[in-house]
Image: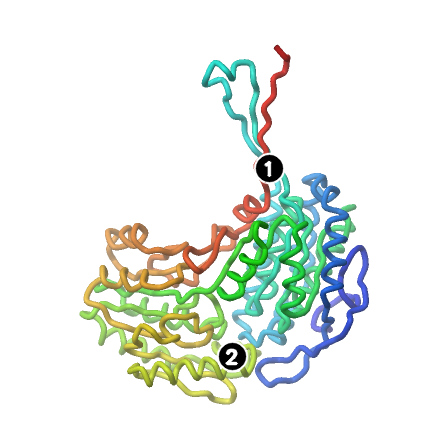
């Protein structure tokens, strides 16, 4: 934890202070397995105490003036900005992501915090004309937004700081206490974020217990998400876990940002250099551990060979190795089990008839950037979320067939189309069954100010501060007759 300047408390941030953790666990650098820190691990009892503390301040947090909520978020933004380089090093240490990706993560977290602070000023309702029928004459109507209650925010390992910011900042902006749970492999950056938010809250005159954190395993997550006293669960992670949370938490509101096997379509009129660059840039960032990284590529037959030649040249130039090296673009996955799974999926695809065009092996613990050709449907490398540096390419007769193939999936988060035709671009917007259609850019493009989320098995609800705040507030209608009849 000494990667970041400042005094860091020991234990878990529960209630108004930090309490001793039941035990500590090693956090390891994925690239070489070395121990970078020991982090607190909570249990079910700690989860329940955090929920009790959140419920105790729920009404007070809901009544916090807008300027207090806004200032707490801005102060947190300043504190993270002052520690930007240290936070980058901390993210490299716990996630093993390349330096370039960790820099982007910190900058995106800063944007998320600042945008949430700005959205506090836009949290309002509007008037409604109630006298459109005679029965409404003399009535005044308006609606307001009110906090949904305690929010449980659970984040995945791949972007721990950014995902936690997307859980915490909108909840606080909406006036909701939040209990955060980071992934067991990557608790460090989230612990720092929560610490800085709590100090900002205290400085603004708000309770520290408006933001708490509990680490731990599945039992802790179940205790948090199944408590019927909470207002909402916001979860980012695998589809299987998200769907289980939705079933177990019902009827509590659940926001899900889940998996995908994002597709990129290369039309016959595409700029092939740009499309090949996009597959490499969009398929291998964060070592492929991103839910909207390029996984499926559908290229029209007439440009297939020319596109593959360009793609092969670029993939061979991808630098792998130590994530601390500024030139590295692909490094180790989060743990050995993930590496073994991805390698097994590559082998399974080859046995099913796919051909390895580039990569396919493991070098110094790092999966080589891999391109598979003609992966059949029915194998995980095409159907499921690989979450590794693997791209599967398939040719199709035309763009219509490509769109059909994109939709032939249980997922629907983002998809992109490379084309020179506005007609094709608008056809993609009309036909593709996804939460976001991206034209002439990677499906992994995300501005943290935009609505972000999926359809089908990829999730429910939308993130982005403005849209998450809407999800975490309820509409309350006021119907007033100023003078009784």
Asked if residue 305 shows in the view, the reply is: yes
Figure disc tally: 2
> What is the crowding at mark 1: few (fewer than 14 residues within 10 Å), some, or many (at least 20)?
some
Residue lying at 28% horizontally and 60% vertically, measured from the top left: 403
Q: Which residue is mark 2?
A: 338
Q: What secondary structure is marked by label 1?
A: strand
Q: Position of residue 81 (x, y in %)?
A: 65, 59
Q: In what quadrant of the picture does the C terminus appear?
A: top right
Pick whichever, 264 or 404, lies toward us. 404
Q: Which mark identifies residue 205? A: none
Q: Is residue 458 left or right of residue 3?
A: left
Q: Residue furthest bottom?
A: 364
Residue lying at 55% horizontally and 78% vertically, measured from the top left: 323
Q: Quadrant of residue 222?
A: bottom right
Label 2 near label 1: C-beta < 8 Å? no
Residue lying at 37% horizontally and 68% vertically, measured from the top left: 278
Asked if residue 166 shows in the view, the reply is: no
Residue lying at 22% horizontally and 68% vertically, measured from the top left: 396
Q: Is residue 311 left or right of residue 69?
A: left
> What is the crowding at mark 2: few (fewer than 14 residues within 10 Å), some, or many (at least 20)?
some
Q: Position of residue 380 (x, y in %)?
A: 39, 75
As measured in the structure, the alpha-carbon distance from the residue carrying label 1 to the one carrying label 2 is: 43 Å
Q: Is residue 153 left or right of residue 262?
A: right
Pick whichever, 456 or 312, lies toward us. 456
Q: Which mark identifies residue 145? A: 1
Q: Is residue 32 above or below residue 46?
A: below
Q: In what quadrant of the picture does the N terminus appear?
A: bottom right
Q: Quadrant of residue 325?
A: bottom right
Q: Earlier in the sequence, mark 1 or mark 2?
A: 1
Q: Residue furthest top?
A: 485
């Amino acid at each position: 934890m000494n990667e970041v300047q400042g005094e860091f408390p020991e234990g878990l941030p529960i209630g108004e202070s930090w309490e001793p953790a039941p035990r500590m666990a090693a956090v390891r650098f994925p690239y070489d397995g070395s121990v970078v820190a020991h982090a607190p691990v909570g249990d079910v009892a700690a989860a329940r105490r955090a929920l009790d503390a959140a419920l105790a301040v729920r009404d007070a947090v809901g009544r916090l003036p807008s300027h207090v909520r806004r200032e707490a978020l801005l102060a947190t933004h300043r504190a993270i900005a002052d520690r930007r380089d240290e936070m980058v090093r901390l993210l490299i240490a716990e996630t093993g992501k390349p330096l370039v990706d960790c820099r982007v993560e910190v900058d995106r977290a800063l944007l998320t915090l600042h945008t949430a602070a700005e959205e506090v000023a836009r949290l309002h309702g509007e008037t409604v004309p109630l006298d459109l029928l005679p029965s409404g004459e003399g009535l005044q109507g308006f609606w307001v937004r009110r906090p949904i209650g305690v929010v449980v925010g659970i984040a995945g390992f791949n972007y721990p700081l950014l995902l936690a910011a997307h859980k915490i900042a909108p909840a606080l902006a909406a006036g909701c206490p939040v209990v955060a749970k980071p992934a067991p492999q990557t608790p460090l950056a989230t612990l720092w974020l929560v610490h800085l938010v709590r100090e900002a809250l205290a400085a603004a005159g708000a309770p520290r217990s408006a933001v708490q954190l509990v680490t731990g395993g599945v039992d802790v997550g179940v205790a948090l998400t199944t408590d019927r006293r909470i207002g909402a669960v916001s979860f980012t992670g695998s589809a299987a876990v998200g769907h289980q949370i939705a079933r177990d938490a019902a009827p509590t509101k659940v926001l899900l940002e889940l998996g995908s096997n994002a597709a990129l379509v290369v039309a016959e009129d595409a700029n092939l250099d740009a499309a090949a660059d996009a597959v490499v840039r969009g398929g291998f960032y964060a070592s492929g551990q991103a839910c909207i990284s390029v996984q499926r590529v559908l290229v029209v037959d007439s440009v297939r060979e020319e596109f593959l030649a360009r793609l092969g040249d670029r993939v061979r130039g991808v630098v792998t190795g130590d994530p601390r090296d500024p030139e590295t673009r692909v490094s180790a996955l989060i743990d050995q089990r993930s590496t073994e799974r991805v390698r097994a999926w590559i082998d399974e695809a080859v046995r099913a008839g796919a051909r390895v065009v580039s990569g396919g092996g493991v070098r110094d613990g790092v999966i080589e950037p891999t391109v598979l050709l003609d992966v059949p449907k029915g194998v995980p490398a095409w159907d499921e979320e690989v979450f590794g540096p693997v791209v599967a390419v398939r040719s199709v007769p035309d763009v219509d067939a490509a769109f059909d193939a994109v939709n032939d999936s249980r997922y629907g988060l983002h998809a992109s189309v490379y084309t020179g035709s506005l007609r094709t671009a608008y056809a993609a917007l009309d036909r593709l069954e996804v939460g976001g259609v991206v034209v002439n850019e990677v499906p992994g493009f995300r501005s943290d100010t935009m609505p972000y989320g999926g359809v089908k098995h990829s999730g429910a609800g939308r993130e982005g501060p403005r849209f998450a705040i809407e999800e975490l507030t309820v509409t309350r209608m006021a119907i007033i007759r100023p003078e009784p009849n």
